[in-house]
Image (cartoon, helix red, strand yellow):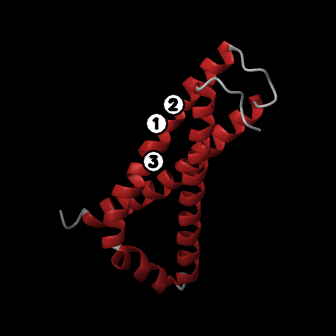
Amino acid sequence: MNQWLPIVIMMNNYFHDVATALLAASALVMVFILRSVSEEKLDQSKLDFIRRIYSSVTRVAVFSLIWILIGGVPRTIFFKRYEWWDAAGKGIVTALVIKHILMFFLVGIGFFLWLKIKKIMSSIEQGNELDK
C-alpha cells in the first residue's frame, strides 16, 4: 500500500478540488435558473421543472459537500508531505496558499448560495412567487 499512497492522496486531492468547484457551480446553476424564471408567472409545468432541477442539482451539491468534508481529512493529514514540500521545492508556496484561500472562498460562496436557494425553494413550495 505504501507505494500506492502518493497516487491515492494525489487523486483524493484532485477530486477534492473538483468537489469544491462542483459545489459552487451547482449553486450558480440554480441561481441562474431561478433568475431566468423570476420575471415570469410560474405555472405548474415551470414549477415541476424547477423542482426536478432543484432535486438533481441538490444531489450534486450534497455529494460535493460530503466529498469536501471526507476528502479533506486525508488531505489535511498528508498536506505537508504531498502538497507543501512539493510547492516549496518548486518555489510556488504563494500560489498554493492563494489556491487554498480561493477554495475556501468557493466553498463559502457555494454554501451561502445554497442556503439562499433553499429559502427560495421553500417559499415556492408554500405557494409564493419567486422572490426577486
What kind of element bears circle 2? helix
> Few, some or many C-alpha atoms within 10 Å of disc 2 (few <14, some 14-19, many ≥20)?
few
Give the quadrant of residue 97. Answer: bottom right
- Tally the marks: 3
Image: 18 above or below 76: above
Tell which of 84 and 31 is nearer to you: 31
How far separated are the C-alphas under marks 3 and 2?
13 Å
Where is residue 52 drawn, in percent x and y? 55, 24
Residue ID for mark 1: 59
Q: Position of residue 129 (x, y in %)?
A: 72, 27
Tell me which residue sits at (38%, 57%) in the image: 69
Q: Are marks 1 and 2 in contact (CB under 8 Å)?
A: yes
Q: Amino acid at mark 2?
A: Ser
- Identify the image quadrant of the N terminus: bottom left
Which of the numbered marks, if any, corresponds to residue 64?
3
Residue under label 2: 56
